[in-house]
Image: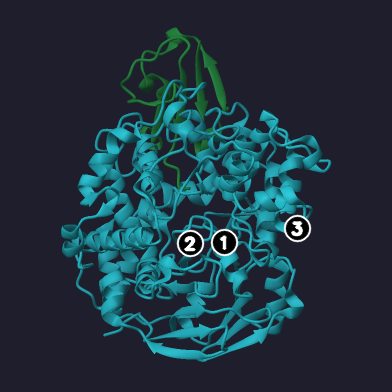
Chain colours: A cyan, B green
Amino acid sequence: MYGSYNAKMARINLTTGSITVEELDLDKAKKFVGGRGLGTKILYDEGIAKVDPLSPENKLVYLPGPLTGTQLPTATRYMVVTKSPLTGMIASSNSGGRWGADLKYAGWEGLIVEGKAENPVYINIQDEKIEILSAEKYVGMLSEELDETLKEVHPKSSVLNIGPSGENLALLAAIMNDKDRAAGRSGVGAVMGSKNLKAITVTAERKVVPPADEVALKEVNKSALQKLREDGVTGTGLPTYGTAVLVNIINNVGSYPTKNWQEAYFEEADEASGETMANTTLVKQGFCHRCPIGCGRVIKLDDKEVGGPEYEPIWAYGANCGVKELEAISRANMMCNEYGLDAIGTPCTIAAAMELYQLGAIKEEECEGVPLTWGSGEAIITWTKRMGEGKIPLAKLMADGSHRLCEFYGHPEVSIAVKKQELPAYDARGIQGIGLNYATSNRGGCHVRGYTIAPEILAHPEQVDRTTTEDKASWVKIFQDLTAVIDSLGLCLFTSFGLGAGDYALMLNAATGTDYDDNQLLEVGERIYNIERLFNKEAGMKPEEDTLPKRVLEEAIPNGPSKGMKSQLNEILPTYYELRGWKDAFPTVETLERLGLS
Amino acid sequence: MIEIRLFATLRQGREKIYHEPAEKFQTGRDIIEYYQISQNDVSIFLINGIHSKLEDAVKAEDVIAIFPPVGGG
């Protein structure tokens, strides 16, 4: 029984122009759910771990989840899975907006895009019809303008595209959809660019995906909506202040990395906080399709309403570059959306460049009139634009991320990254569990693979001591496994503030006819986490890459409430491996057998 | 003196920061009662950046930060 799974996937070969309809392998889908899990399984089985990420041999799998397009709250997300050119490992970046739901409404469970078009093209999907069209006249167009232009050509469509940075194969390139939503991380936009694929438009007649059990879905939907409404985070905090409400919290626990992690407390943080935004530039909440939370911010900039910055870019352009002005941060963030750049990796690379400039490794003459000085609003805006354009040599190098930049200048220790991907906005010296999550994240430095900030900082579901390593290995494992499920269902991770594994099991069962309980669903998450790890092993990952930057392991925080703290990663990593059933960073034969992966 | 920082919805009808003589308060609970903050509205209570209980003692030079249920990044 397919339930809310669509029965078909499309395989689109851009080299030959062939479009093949394939039946969804339902057994495989149920074993790996969809989205992130199923996408990784497909790529692993097709041998993608060993290919050059920017060659025609790499593939892009666009997969909503089985719940995407149902009436459930936040059921709109899609995942793009590929081999990352930034990390050389698995990439799975997801995004909200509406595009993912429209792909489901159009009748497709997912798209597998392979090969490379001879000239720039885009894919147009109108229900069952799929065509490859010329995109020559759209080359160089900024992402938001292209979204509007393609909507004129294909009225009522949802648009996914890459900006100029994806065309330039910048390793920090994102895939944008519905104007300001982004599958931001791991350089997925560069893979799209390498295939000469500029955009995918989708138009659908259908407006909802029917579930296997209409009555059960209605019931679980009602209960989920109520839980999300009653939860303090999803019911009040996120709607009122957006994700930027975290600025003051994380700064007040002294774990708000400042000046490329040289410090961890930023005196002026409140000037660019969710509270300040709410009292100044905020116009209204921004909602993804089917979302009752509305964490997005619509702000006013130059008399235009635009997507406002989330917590991550506010931190990365703000404290991490020593910049306090919300307006400069908002402009730089908008530049990321227009050029299609990762709004975490891009500002973090600018922060690394600022430290290289501080060290004298980057010379003033390389800066072409805009020095990379701490606290310079002009620098964060101009250098983001330059990275998006990719014309100036230094900016072109920066657009490939901090790892390559800092290697080039002979200061690898300045890159604050794991597996070549920049770390996000929580200092792992003051918050021990998140450091273990960063170190073991299969897609490299990332907070949303196992968001232990919830228990360590936000008292969700209970308060645990951020400063100790006690029980952190099990917190990280369970958060990583549950997140792998949520990412595969097609729902927003923020629902997990109000919902638990049992709720997700009820949703999946009602939608697809499965019979999972909460523990079985967590085991599915564990299976997904392990198939990703197998992909990385085949891609050449080394056990010593499960680590943190030298600064985080060896240099104590010099200021603020967490002064003196360092990451104690090496104390907890062996316990984590033991819990996972891994030896030397990879699953043992017994673990693979237990999870049905042998 | 004790520095008391309020955030998010707790700022509605109140200042962002207060400085009060240390002898005014014994514990965190005294502080929230003084500012008429309901216990249900306190999700994170920090004394010098460390998560603490409302029953914990406060002393001169402490920085207190109080947050309602918020978060998600």
Q: Quadrant of the N terminus of chain A?
A: bottom left
Q: Is residue A220 left or right of residue A83?
A: left
Say if mark 3 contacts mark 1, CB within 8 Å: no
**Residues packed near mark 1 inside 10 Å, few (<14), some (14 to 19) or many (20 plus):** many
Residue mark closest to the camera, 2 vs 3: 2
Query: Same chain for the residues at labels 2 and 3, yes or no?
Result: yes
Looking at the picture, does residue A487 appear above or below residue A128? above
The residue indicated by pointer 1 is A182
Residue A309 percent location from the top left of the image: 62, 50
Residue A424 percent location from the top left of the image: 50, 44
Callout 3 amino acid: Lys
Q: Quadrant of residue A439?
A: top left
User: Mark 2 or 3 closer to N-term?
Assistant: 2
- Work out whether residue A463 or residue B6 is closer to the camera in this orientation and state it: A463
Badge 3 marks a residue whose secondary structure is strand
- Work out whether residue A577 or residue A343 is closer to the camera in this orientation and state it: A577
The residue indicated by pointer 2 is A93
Q: Which mark is residue A304?
A: 3
Query: Same chain for the residues at labels 3 and 1, yes or no?
Result: yes
User: Mark 3 or 1 closer to N-term?
Assistant: 1
Q: Quadrant of residue A368?
A: top right
Subunit ID for the residue under disc 3? A
